[in-house]
Amino acid sequence: MKDAAHNKQTPSIGCGCSSCKCSATKKPNFVFILVDDQDKSYNSSHPRYQPALHKYLRTQGTEFDNHYVTTPVCCPSRTNILFGKYSHNTNMTDVFPPVAGGYTKLAAGLNHGPYLPKYLQDAGYNTYYAGKFLVEYALYNYRPVPEGWTDFDAAIHPWVFRYEYPVFARNGGQPTLYAGQYHTDVVASKARAQIQSAKKAGKPFYIQVAPIGCHDACYVDEDFNGYLTPPLPAPRHAKLYAEVNLPLRPNHNEEDVSDKPAWLQAVPRLDAANVTYLNEYYRERLRSLRAVDELVEAVVKELEAVGELDNTYIIYTGDNGYHLGAHRLGAGKETPYQEDIQVPFLIRGPGIQAGKVSTTPTAHEDILPTILSLAGMSLPSDLDGQPLPLPLSNSKEAKAVQYEQPKHKFEQHLTEYWGLFADQLAAGELSRITNFTWKAVSVHTPEQNYKYVVWCSGEREFYDRSVDQFELVNSAKSADPRLLDRLDALLSALAHAKAGQLTNPWPTIHPDNSVTSFAQALNPKHDDFYRQLPKFKFLSCLDHYDTENELSPFYHSSQQRQQLEAAAAAAPPLDFAKLRQQRLLQYKEAESAPGVNFNVKPGTVLAGVEAHAVPLPAAEFERFRRYKADMVDEAKYYRLKSMA
């Protein structure tokens, strides 16, 4: 798309002197640090635990205090960032194949449209990647590498979450083991070398750095069973925070869940062993994040050493939130509750105000348009997000930034999830719910802070977060029906929306433009209209997105709705095992290559950690190269899904 990747004819971005010659050509660089499973709710990014993040980003940039993911699990969420689109528009709704997830699916779609690195390459950038890409970037499908990267150095499944056994494949080369090295340290070393390579190349650059901290550690045995443990910290951090306990939010181990959906009512309260377990789990998460914090400092100092810090935007965020004991749950994600969908988000760079906190609600789909706009590029018309409302300073750098501010208010956002829920408890317990599909809409205005959830079971939740920020009282059965009618209509409008319909859904609901905000929608004159609208409905609990399974009055006529409901009622129960067998993709097995082959271009700076690289042992290679065959086995498939 021509409008997606050409430069605006505007003054320079990131050059302090808007009148000097360099300002006509100098483009900013980007370093995007994407961490794994870091929560916002339990203060894991506090200066005590991440002093470098505080020193180099929070005090030197802006923190968005209400930033949300829209699908709270890693693979879909990371895809949302790369494409600037919601999961229902990428249909990347799972972590593993065969239905709707994994690198296999992403790779199949990369040829069908541009995404973040290709946009930037078309604008003259070099693009680099170091760390975890997607969980299912694996030994059997790591070739070919994803398009759009100048240098792509990613961790390989099934060793992605082995903190003490890092295995990477660079640009499709031989899988390499970094013996005796800590995973996050390997990523930090690679990122520093990529900064040096980018500087040496003499072009503006984008570097995505993706450590696995603070995700669970995961071990896969010879029978392809996945075993989870709390994160493994670097040895130097193993004794930190011994006196720290998990912050007990009011919804911790919630006593009365009779107002919650049936699946949660069936969850017993945490016993003493699990309370103790979650405390240590929390400490291990903090310890593993300390190496991430050192990575942040290493990146900043390397940028400073090569003379690019002042011309580089550094972004820090996580792929999803995390709960630890909320609503009597164990350790996990994937729910619509606040702990799972809210994440840290910090940005520093030319013209960005220092020490600023923004309370504007924003989402992951806004990251791509923000980066493209800061790069001086026109925005593609099919993006689901819009540029963040960045607070710019009065400095010369800020005046040089030609930034496209958002066109619409950040008033509402959609969250959505399909499929399996897995929750970790003590003693190796892992509770699972297979039909765990839901959609939710949140409304944030100066007057309102609402969350409305619809489950595939037909159950509903409503929280007035202005008075119930911990989501203790589900008022779906007692709230004003007029309010619930509006929220259901808003969810219905967003459920299948694309591009601008997501940032401004009101023309979908009111084509005559008589309503342009939630406050206007509450006018009593619209009561009849909203009351008569059919309610949003899932026909069945599918583990993937299907427009015909999610009924909305704005996308399905009354006749279509009746036909789809009748067909669903007459259909036999879904056989998920058979469905997966039918849709199982044909994986390409990895091929062996002798020796360590970094597969790098001339002039590339090798990281210091490469001195520890050895070929992946042949026994390991052979043990896992037929991994694809075991994915066919449904029981093993579900065991492996616990690594998501």
Image: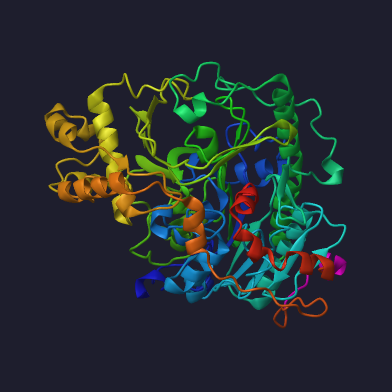
Judge left or right: residue 98 versus residue 196: left
In the picture as drawn, the residue positioned furthest to the top comes out as: 255
The one nearer the camera, 515 or 146, is: 146
Q: Give the range drawn in magenta.
A: 604-614
Q: Does the magenta stretch include residue 164?
A: no
Query: Does the image show residue 107?
Result: yes
* Colouring used for the render: rainbow
The x, y position of residue 394, in whole percent, is 47, 49
The one nearer the camera, 320 or 515, is: 320
Q: Residue at x 37, y 31 (%)?
A: 459
The x, y position of residue 517, in whole percent, is 25, 38
**Quarter holding residue 176:** bottom right
**Quarter holding residue 158:** bottom right
Q: Which residue is drawn at 21% across and 50% down?
A: 563
The x, y position of residue 106, in whole percent, is 51, 65
In the displayed structure, would residue 519 be above or below residue 137? above
In the displayed structure, would residue 250 be above or below residue 365? above
In the displayed structure, would residue 114 be above or below residue 349? below
